[in-house]
Amino acid sequence: MNTPKQVKGMRKILRDMPPIRRRMIIMLLSVLILMGLIVAFNIFKSVMIKKYMSGASAPPQTVSTIKVVEDDWQPQLSAVGNVRAFRGVELSTEVSGIVRAVPVTSGMDVRAGDVLVELTQAADIALLDALKAQADLAKIINDRDRMQLEIRAISQNVFDASSADLKAKQAQVRQQTSLVSKKNLKAPFSGRVGIVTINPGQYVNPGDKLFTIQTIDPIFIDFTLPQNTVGKIEKGQDILLKADAFGERVFKGKVSAISPKVELNTRNIQVEAIVSNLDKKLLPGMFANVVLELGSAVKYMTIPQTAITYNPYGSIVFVVNQTDRLDKDGKPIIEAEQTFVTTGATRGDQVAILQGLKLGSEIVTSGQLKLKNGTPLIINNTVLPANNANPKPLEK
């Protein structure tokens, strides 16, 4: 501190200074004092804010919760498959001609060998009759030459010529018989006829697609599975199938074949299954959801998928913890605790938990986006997220 003598000396120095210089010094001192006060105020404000923030607790967040339970879990493989006919073909004729009759109608069930389309064949039958007559005559001549050869009435050359002529005539008969048979388009196998659009009097060319015939009982399902599932599937394994067209109806079948190679582009393996289709409801070209059950059921802790929060460090679940502190109403304060978990397979709205949770723990299922460790919680379970192993669509 300055002594009175020093203060008097400073006053004397100020009095002896020129007025302009004295005013400048006074102004500078005033500015320095003002700046010091501003800095001191800002420091004081920061300290008080930090003190307030450290003492203030986070506001409570409203969440829904559920207790972790153990449930029976059937290991499954799921895939989307395509329905394919057991046998199916687009029919066409080998010869051209005018349609004489169409004995079948659209959607008709036929047996193998049934006539589907008849072409005009009168001229072909007449030619066949003429060739048969020629073949009969050649046979008579050949039989006569054989008897004459036995008594040495003709030479061997004459008999060989008549034998060759007989064989040629018989070959012509077989050729014409085959042509006549091609005029009748027959079902190559039993099945159901598609939409018939041809009519009598219509001219058709070889290779023209007339209509389809499909064998749909039984029926095939083609689907693919990842290559790492090859060791889990085998021929004869049961499958369950659902098609959107039939709601919750389940069709049962068996794996009939597994491809011996893996597709290079997708690294998937193709699987074929055969399904009984007695009522012929499944149709080729439909898509269906295929489920393969693997082994016997096991027990897993299950929680709704909405309870999982995913980040680059892993999967997180918030567990509800009850503290020893009381709120203003005298009730124990509950807080959120962040826990990393190891998830397993999923089914419907549920996910299996392999590690990280204890049976019976209460976890947050919705509202966890604003949570962190120690956030106070308000539980409201009036509306809960979906937690169904086999969810159904709301719209039909």
Image (cartoon, helix red, strand yellow):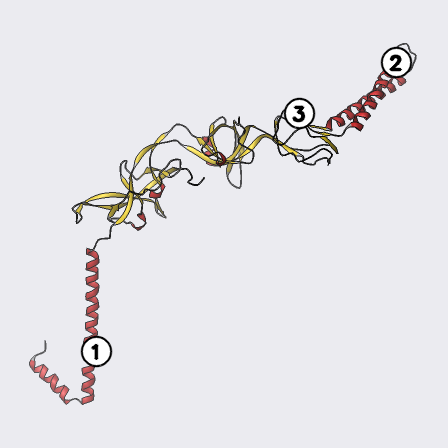
**Disc 1 residue type (three-letter):** Val
**Disc 3 residue type (three-letter):** Asp
- Residue at the left extreme? 4
In percent of width and height, residue 206 lies at 72, 35
In percent of width and height, residue 293 lies at 43, 30
Q: Secondary structure at mark 1?
A: helix
Whether residue 316 is visible here, answered yes or no, is: yes
The quadrant holding residue 388 is top left
Q: Is residue 310 left or right of residue 82?
A: left
- Residue at the top extreme? 151
| Closer mark to the observer between disc 2 and disc 3 | 3
Q: Secondary structure at mark 3?
A: loop
Looking at marks 2 and 1 on the same chain, the residue that comes earlier in the sequence is marked by 1
Whether residue 234 is visible here, answered yes or no, is: no
| Residue count near mark 3 (Cα–Cα under 10 Å), binned few <14, some 14–19, many ≥20 | some
The quadrant holding residue 215 is top right
Asked whether disc 2 touches disc 1, contact meaning CB atoms under 8 Å apart, the reply is no
Looking at marks 1 and 3 on the same chain, the residue that comes earlier in the sequence is marked by 1
Q: Residue at x 14, y 86 (%)?
A: 14
Residues 176 and 28: in front is: 176
Q: Is residue 76 left or right of residue 172?
A: left
- Mark on residue 114? 3
- Alpha carbons under labels 1 and 3: distance apart: 114 Å
**Disc 2 residue type (three-letter):** Arg
Q: Name the residue that disc number 2 marks.
A: 144
Above or below, 171 relative to 210:
above
| Closer mark to the observer between disc 1 and disc 3 | 3
The quadrant holding residue 131 is top right
Q: Residue at x 33, y 32 (%)?
A: 71
| Residue count near mark 2 (Cα–Cα under 10 Å), binned few <14, some 14–19, many ≥20 | few
Q: Name the residue that disc number 1 marks.
A: 31
